[in-house]
Amino acid sequence: MIRKTTWILLALFGVSILAIVLWSARGEQPGSAEATPAAAPLWTVDSASIRSIRLEDTGSGTLVEVERHPEEAWHLVQPTVGPADAGRVERAASWLASPQPRGVVEAGGDWAAFGLDVPAKRITVTLDDGAQHMVEVGRTDPTGAVMYARIPGGAQVYLMSKFGLDEVLGLLDSVPVAELTATPQSTAPTVSPAATTTP
């Protein structure tokens, strides 16, 4: 025969197991601190419709702006005016056509934890029809693989690939000025005047 105390211990054990299961299930509810596995792009546009890209470093005050140009492909507007390195800018434009987050977390109003209370960088994309898309970039996460970002006025923090963002933010670190091509030199041999002899 099982004693009364044994039944009590078994009941307490069962309640403990139930509490652990319920607590675990609660932690997996949407809105927890974990990133959602699937996140839609911040926006999706045709890269050919991007008219200009403006990058700001809020700490240093550095500003780089490029515009699509009918003859030069891309043209620098800031910090200097002139032809831009079209290859570098086009790679940035391709990424900015559909910036894909790795995940999303709810900030809960604590923007400082993500470096987004005073964002370090700001990216503005202007389209041919005048529409604009903007994203603010905060600090890098402890793994070094993700940067925190948000849409101004939004409540979510997006986990963006640092590798992808570096393609864009690298234009701030090294202004994409087009390299001047050297003028081709003539390869014709130099003909020296014929020697003359005196009689």
Image (cartoon, helix red, strand yellow):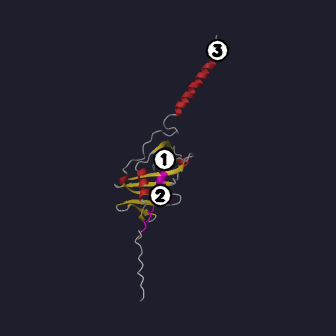
Kindly report the distance in space between the C-alpha atoms of the residues bearing marks 3 and 2.
75 Å
Q: Which of 157 and 186 is in front in this view?
A: 186
Name the element at disc 1.
strand
Residue 189's spot in the image, x, y percent? 41, 73
Kindly report the distance in space between the C-alpha atoms of the residues bearing marks 2 and 1.
17 Å
Q: Which residue is drawn at 47% across and 53% down?
A: 167
Would you say 27 lies left or right of 51 here? right
Residue 149's spot in the image, x, y percent? 49, 48
**Residue designated by label 2:** 171
Front position among marks 2 and 1: 2
**Crowd tier of the residue under label 1, counting other residues whose Cα lies within 10 Å: few below 14, some 14–19, many 20 or above:** many
Q: In which quarter of the image is the N terminus?
A: top right
**Residue designated by label 3:** 4
Name the element at disc 3.
helix
Front position among marks 3 and 1: 1
Disc 3 vs disc 1: Cβ atoms closer than 8 Å? no
- Say which amino acid is labelled 3: Lys
Boundaries of the magenta span: 161-182
Residue 195, magenta (yes or no): no
Kindly report the distance in space between the C-alpha atoms of the residues bearing marks 3 and 1.
58 Å
